[in-house]
Image (tube, rainbow, N blue to C red):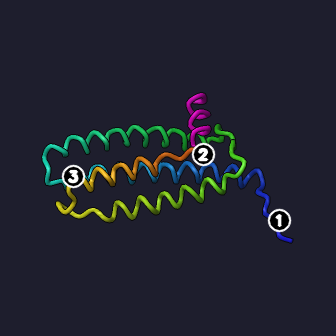
Amino acid sequence: MENTLMTFKQKDKIINDILKTTLSIEQIANAFYFQLAESTCDASMHDFWLKMAGEEQTHILFWEKALKLAEEEKIPQIFDAPEKILNELNVLLSTLTNLFDSITECTIDSKKALLLSFKIEFYNIHIGLAPLFNVIKRIS
């Protein structure tokens, strides 16, 4: 019978993988909003998308700081099933990548762009990250 329990060392590594994946998700969202700003044919939406990209940049800075703390072994492994969280985040990353790849210059109207933005924000909320977020806020 194969042992499927993770060692403490594996769990420490997976927290880094969770943070790297979360950071990648935020980077894609940021790039997505910048691409929308550049691709929109509606001048009134340009500033809105740039503001959204700016908010994602704030998230990127947070997760970069968190990853640095994890690499310094300052973030404890808090998940009961970290591999499940990582798998879910990888699905999310794939979904966002596909959404990002669907944008082509000036072919996306404002309604479709807003719907895609809603999807990004919806997918970007992962309930499993809330405890991690709180731990990082206390540490940093």
| Position of residue 127 measured from the top left corner of the image (x, y, whole percent) | 57, 44
Label drawn at residue 128: 2
- Circle 1 residue: 3
x%, y% of residue 109? 20, 56
Residue at 39% across / 51% down in the picture?
A: 120
Give the residue at x 27% y 53%: 113
Q: Residues within 10 Å of mark 1 (few under 14, many from 20)?
A: few
Amino acid type, callout 2: Gly
Judged from the image, the secondary structure of the residue bearing numbered disc 2 is loop
| Secondary element at image label 3 | helix
Residue 84 vs residue 72, the one in the foreground: 84
Q: Residue at x 59, y 54 (%)?
A: 17
- On the rendered image, what quadrant is the C terminus found in? top right
- Looking at the image, residue 92 sits to the left or right of residue 7; the answer is left
Q: Residues within 10 Å of mark 3 (few under 14, many from 20)?
A: some
Magenta stretch contains residue 130: yes
Q: Which residue is mark 3?
A: 110
* Range shown magenta: 129-140
